Amino acid sequence: MISEEKLKKIADIMNTLTEEYADYYRIRERIDIDSANLKIWSKGYIEPFSCDYITDMFDNTVEPRKLMKAPRKKEYVTFHYMNDEAPVYSVYYGKNDDIYMEKLYFSIHKRRIEVLFSSPKHILLELTLTLFDEKGRPAEFSTIRIDKNGLKMIKAAVYTYDGDHIVKAESICDFNPETSVVMYDDEVFNPDFYFQPKYMNPPDVSDYAFNYTDNKVETFTRTDYDYKKVHENTWKLRRGIIKRYTECGIKWFGEQ
């Protein structure tokens, strides 16, 4: 489970970054699209190089990331400008070839900052910070989303490796960074009480253990910490996930 100290640090960092990167026109000047030497198309909201693997695996409503050829009709697809393997700028298409979002990327010493804006109004919607280890592997990510009323929510994950494979992830979701952290506590959240004296923040706290067969993930065990008890379930990985990861150059869960 991600510690309280770690959550407070995440909240401070993400609040600071949203202030620093909120001005689209100021930070857009720092993006050199001409430096891009590779351009790729993808389908699905999650970019092919995203380090959020938890959403892919557990949310059945999310369309898996997918590389594709240049489409004849630009509907619900994304165009990415890449500098080698590093993203520079992404354009998201909705209906009728209309651009409805843009994402700017900044790579700074083992970390990548991704800033998502609406288009054409350029309102800050989301910011992601990904940290990489000394081998260039994703070690953790945090994503802060801002709704139309200014409410902020964070999801995050910290990854643990055995060799080059991710074997564990500590995950949180719907964390409000502007209120106090309230961690799961067996004594506070007593199953004998219907009305709880406190509400967790974040309310969604999970640990994942990835189970490998023939050098690739077959199942994962998810442990959820909620108000009344700890739940543990093992799930079979959705069909095709490892294949999609392999196509996108993601090798932390084995290859197919």
Image (cartoon, helix red, strand yellow):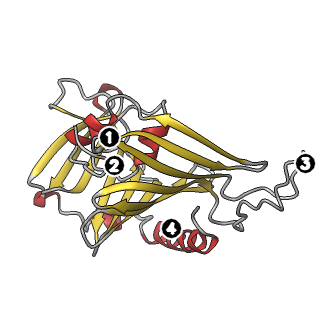
Q: Residues within 10 Å of mark 4 (few under 14, many from 20)?
A: many
- Which residue carries the number 1 mark? 92
Q: Residues within 10 Å of mark 3 (few under 14, many from 20)?
A: few
**Label 4 to label 2, Cα distance in Å?**
19 Å
Judge by depth and name the residue closer to the eye, 78 or 156.
Answer: 156
* Mark closer to the observer (3, 1): 3
- Which residue carries the number 3 mark? 192
Q: Earlier in the sequence, mark 4 or mark 2?
A: 4
Q: Earlier in the sequence, mark 2 or mark 3?
A: 2
Q: Earlier in the sequence, mark 4 or mark 3?
A: 4
* Mark closer to the observer (4, 2): 4
Which mark identifies residue 102? Answer: 2
Quadrant that contains the C terminus: top left
Please state if 16 lies on the left or on the right of 203 as rendered. Answer: left
**Label 2 to label 3, Cα distance in Å?**
49 Å
Residue at 15%, 31% in the rendered image: 69
Q: Position of residue 171 (x, y in %)?
A: 53, 55
Q: Amino acid at mark 4?
A: Met
Q: Earlier in the sequence, mark 3 or mark 1?
A: 1
Q: Are marks 3 and 1 in contact (CB under 8 Å)?
A: no
Q: Amino acid at mark 1?
A: Tyr
